[in-house]
Amino acid sequence: MQIAKFRWLLILILLSTGISAQSQIKVTGVVTDASGEEMPGVNISIKGTTIGTITDLYGKFSINAPDKSSVLTASFIGYQKKEFKIGNQTSVKIVLEEDAMALDEVVISAGYTEVKRRDFTGAAGKANLTDMMKTPIASFDQALAGRIAGVQVSSNEGMPGSTFNIVVRGNNSLTQSNAPLYVIDGFPVEDANAAAINPSDIESLDILKDASATAIYGARGANGVVIITTKKGVAGKPTVTYNGSFSVQKITNKLDMLDPYEFVKLQTEVRTKAEMDKTYFSPIGEGDNQVIRNLDYYRHVPYYDWQDEIFRTALTNNHYASLTGGKDGTRYSTSLSYLSQEGVIMNSDFERYQGRMSLDQKISDRFSVNMNANYTRAITNGASPSSTVSSATSSLMYSVWGYRPITYDDTDLLNSLYDPAVDQANDYRFNPILSSREEYRKRIEDNLVANAFVEYKILNGLKAKVSAGYRLKNVLSESFNNSKTRYGNPSRSEGVNASMRTEESRSWLNENILTYVKTFKKKHNINMLA
């Protein structure tokens, strides 16, 4: 009797599970803005539930709704939230409209002038710095991914201090750089080091995404323009601000590697029995202490975990202090910051020292002067984990994942640069721990950007602005490979070697701008620039 009851209960559970699965509706779709541009990072959710997802780089999404009566919600910062009942729809296209109130409140920096979002006719995006600064970040590009429609952000590698790739509206060239032009406080640079700007010093960040950027900046703006404006002083009593953070980084998911038993089992499949009898299955010890090794012997032997050896728990310290204030037409802002970041790979770290100064002086009702300067020194230690010389097998991570976990003789793999079982003629695997510990790599980069301008109001609405800028970039790269490294061991023709490389670049800028801004009858606006 009990068996019959259990059987009916099992049937009811299976039927209810089948009915529940059949009632779910898979909804796929794409989200665009009013101009038809796909929007990545849009929040898609089922109202009243915890079910949710976000759109990918192409604005596409897929979500399972409980039933036809479910309400799908799409939301994105600066855009109106959109909701609709799913019904029988399985494929949808969602168009998000910009928030009307945000259009009046948000001001876009469009080249040499600033306009309200409502009056701006081109394609532009504005970063929400309040949300970006909620997490401790070393540079603004780390928090920019998925926050502005049409802007793709990807990482070159996880090395401390490395910059991110920012691509505006897709790749335009197959052979040349697709990086945008950076304009920092009015100074345009093509090779901006994002890490040279402290995120806490940024007042606004705007991105020009369409052809209007080329009308202002010429061919340099063909890949889009990232306009960064730093903070200025505020009239009032001197105000001291301090921000500090401490964070811990570690590898969350290591690759599953072969343990000794699995590794030796693989060797039995790729090697002959004679080779195995001479290596992994050869007896060890002598006399009564002799041990005959077979496959089961390797189930419980100690082995090398190369990932545990090279990865570590890394600490990061970030400190920022600023002083702002002003009175009687004088406003000032100064800041100092220090960042220390260890890499999760041994013998790698990044340090940044940064100082900034801004001064606004109103000499008269018609004449004003502004000066600001930013200096940064960035020090990077450690070799790039993804760099290669002649083959992918010479990269650091290839050896971490490709080195064998055990040895069949008395060889100490941890202190041997090369595995004697590997043919070095066509396989360049090396001991990743020994080489990383012995290699010396250091890069010191100094960046100075200084701007100044004078502004004179000729008539009401008509003003002239003369500005000058200067940028200095110095880079010193040092390396040393001793006899225990992959590039300095005795088997290489160059042997022990060292190198030092210096780079220096200087840029000057002069701009002379005449603008006329006038409003007639509270609704007719004229904005002219020469």
Image (tube, rainbow, N blue to C red):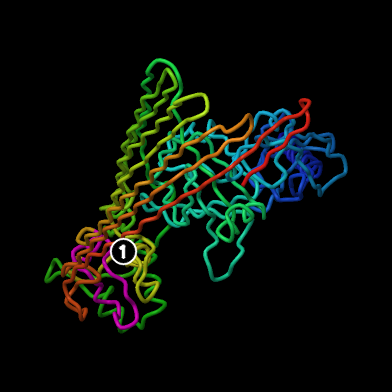
Which residue is the extreme one toward the right?
88
Q: Residue at x 37, y 72 (%)?
A: 393
Q: Which residue corresponds to mark 1?
A: 405
Q: Residue at x 37, y 18 (%)?
A: 238
Relative side of 58 to 85, left or right? left
SS assignment at label 1 = loop
* Amino acid at the residue labelled 1: Pro
The part of the chain drawn in magenta is 413-436
Name the image quarter holding the N terminus: top right
Q: Position of residue 63 (x, y in %)?
A: 72, 44
Q: Which picture quadrant has residue 417?
A: bottom left
| Of residues 12 and 25, the one drawn nearer to the viewer in this rendering | 25
Relative side of 462 to 524, left or right? left
Whether residue 313 can be seen here:
no
Which residue is the extreme one toward the front?
458
| Of residues 120 and 25, the one drawn nearer to the viewer in this rendering | 120
Q: Residue at x 44, y 48 (%)?
A: 194
| Of residues 102 and 49, the one drawn nearer to the viewer in this rendering | 102
